[in-house]
């Protein structure tokens, strides 16, 4: 009986169809895709007769290509790719502006200009900094991927809420600031 139930739950045809969908790459252009703002400030997409009431835009190469190769995805729990925008330059006017706004919100990354203090307590570090958007306090989980070295001098810090902060050049920090930071990088 259990085996019969498992056979009913597993459909080879459905699995093949889902696999084909995942492997298919669809490029979005201004000819086949229409982006619109929703009432709540999100984006919706209609492409080739399919409508997606809410989408998100994700950079495939966030540090090298900020306006090329953007993945447009569903926002549900099992987010899946709808298509790829090869180059933002293909979308001008209102559409380009809407897409850039979504990217700016998703990739908001204040630049840390001054480190006031960093203290370590119970597996977390508590940062007090000044950013290009003003003073800020945040908490970082020690270990793991919270601090990412993007180059020898550039680091990305991710807090426990997944907010990102950037230090573009460690060498521009004062010796005192680097000393505070040394324990955590």
Image: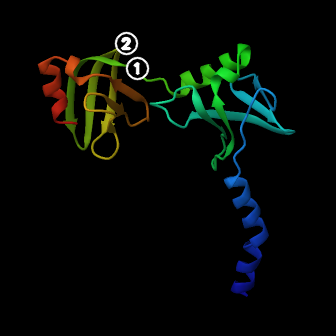
Label disc, if present, on residue 51 of the rendered structure = none
Residue 73 found in image quarter? top right
Taking the image as shown, residue 80 lies to the left or right of residue 126, namely right
Taking the image as shown, residue 36 lies to the left or right of residue 80, namely right
> Can you give x and y, in whole percent of width and height, for residue 80 in the image?
66, 47
Q: Is residue 20 above or below residue 173?
A: below
Please tell me which residue is depicted at 77% across the width and 65% down the height of the picture. 14
> Can you give x and y, in whole percent of width and height, for residue 9 in the image?
73, 73
Q: How many marks?
A: 2
Return the residue at label 2: 132
Residue 19 found in image quarter? bottom right
Please tell me which residue is depicted at 34% across the width and 28% down the height of the picture. 138
> For the residues marked 1 and 2, what is the alpha-carbon distance in whole angstroms?
6 Å
Taking the image as shown, residue 131 lies to the left or right of residue 28, namely left
* Sequence-earlier tag: 1 or 2: 1
Q: Is residue 13 above or below residue 2?
A: above
Residue 58 appears in the rendering: yes
Q: Badge 1: how crowded within 10 Å, few (<14), some, or many (20+)? A: some
| CB atoms of marks 1 and 2 within 8 Å | yes
Return the residue at label 1: 110
Image quarter of the N terminus: bottom right
Q: Secondary structure at mark 1?
A: loop
Q: Is residue 14 above or below residue 152?
A: below
> Can you give x and y, in whole percent of width and height, for residue 118 in the image?
21, 28
Towards the viewer: 178 or 2: 178
Residue 41 appears in the rendering: no
> Can you give x and y, in whole percent of width and height, for residue 71 in the image?
62, 37
Q: Badge 2: how crowded within 10 Å, few (<14), some, or many (20+)? A: few
State the residue lying farthest toward the bottom: 1
């Amino acid at each position: 009986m259990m085996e019969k139930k498992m056979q009913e739950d597993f459909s080879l045809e459905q699995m093949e169809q889902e696999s084909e969908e995942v492997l298919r790459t669809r490029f979005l252009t201004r000819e086949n895709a229409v982006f619109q703002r929703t009432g709540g400030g999100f984006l919706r997409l209609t492409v080739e007769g399919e409508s997606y009431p809410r989408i998100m835009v994700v950079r495939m190469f966030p540090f090298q290509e900020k306006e090329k190769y953007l993945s447009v995805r569903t926002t549900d729990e099992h987010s899946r790719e709808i298509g790829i925008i090869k180059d933002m330059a293909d979308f001008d006017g209102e559409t380009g502006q809407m897409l850039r706004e979504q990217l700016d919100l998703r990739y908001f990354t204040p630049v840390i200009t001054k480190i006031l203090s960093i203290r370590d307590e119970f597996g977390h570090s508590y940062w007090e900094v000044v950013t290009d958007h003003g003073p800020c306090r945040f908490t970082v989980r020690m270990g793991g991927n919270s601090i990412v070295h993007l180059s020898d001098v550039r680091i990305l810090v991710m807090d426990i809420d997944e907010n990102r902060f950037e230090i573009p050049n460690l060498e521009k920090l004062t010796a005192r600031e680097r000393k505070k930071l040394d324990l955590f990088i």
